Image (spheres, rainbow, N blue to C red):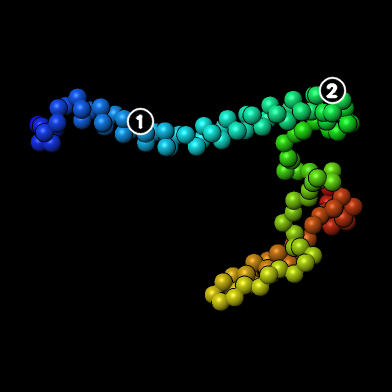
Amino acid sequence: MLLSLFGLPEHVVETFVSRLFFILALITIGPWILVLVYDFVLYVFRAAGYEIPYVGGRARGEMRPRAPSLTERPSGHRRSFSLARRSEPMARATGALRTEAVRLEARVRHMVEESDDDPAVAVG
C-alpha cells in the first residue's frame, strides 16, 4: 500500500532498499576487514623476511619477531607493578579535586611494603 504511494513498482523499491542495506553493511564491516587483512599481510611479510637466507633476520643473527610483552621492558628487565608511592612527586590537583587527591596521597604515603626479612612479619 505504502509502496504504491511512491508510484514505483514494488520490486524497484525492494531492490533499492536491499542495495542500500548492503552498502551500509559494507561501510560498517569494510574497515574491520581491511584492518584484519593488513594485519595478516604484515605478519606474513615479517615472518617471511625473517626466514630469507643471507639477508633475513635469522642470517643476521636477530631474534625472531614477537609481540610486545606487558611484563618485560625492551631492555629485558621485568616491570614491577606496585601500589606504593612513587619516588617522583605526584602532580598537584587544583580546585575541588584537590582535597580528594590529598586524601588519596595521604593513604598511599602510609603504605609500607613487606619483605621476607622483615621482623614485623610473623611466620607461623
Identity of the residue drawn at 26% across and 31% down? 16
Q: Is residue 86 above or below residue 47?
A: below
Q: Is residue 95 above or below residue 69?
A: below
- Mark 2 or mark 1: whose residue is earlier in sequence: 1
Identity of the residue drawn at 14% across and 31% down? 8
Q: Which residue position is annotated with label 2?
A: 53
Identity of the residue drawn at 83% across and 30% down? 57
Q: Is residue 100 above or below residue 52?
A: below
In the foreground, 77 or 118: 77
Where residue 46 appears, as percent x and y from the top left, is 73, 30
In the foreground, 84 or 80: 80
Tell me which corner region of the image, top left, top right, bottom left or bottom right, holds residue 67.
top right
Where residue 111 appears, as percent x and y from the top left, is 74, 62
Q: CA distance from mark 2 to mark 1?
A: 46 Å
Q: Amino acid at mark 2?
A: Pro
| Left or right side of 5 for 37 | right
View extreme (bottom): residue: 95
**Secondary structure type for disc 2:** loop
Within 10 Å of disc 1 (Cα), the crowding (few <14, some 14-19, many 20+) is few
Within 10 Å of disc 2 (Cα), the crowding (few <14, some 14-19, many 20+) is few
Identity of the residue drawn at 68% across and 70% down? 91
Q: Are marks 2 and 1 in contact (CB under 8 Å)?
A: no
Q: Which residue position is annotated with label 1?
A: 22
Q: Is residue 79 visible?
A: yes
| Left or right side of 122 for 84 | left
Where residue 114 appears, as percent x and y from the top left, is 81, 55
Q: Is residue 124 visible?
A: no
| Left or right side of 81 for 19 | left
**Secondary structure type for disc 1:** helix
In the foreground, 87 or 73: 73
Q: Amino acid at mark 1?
A: Phe
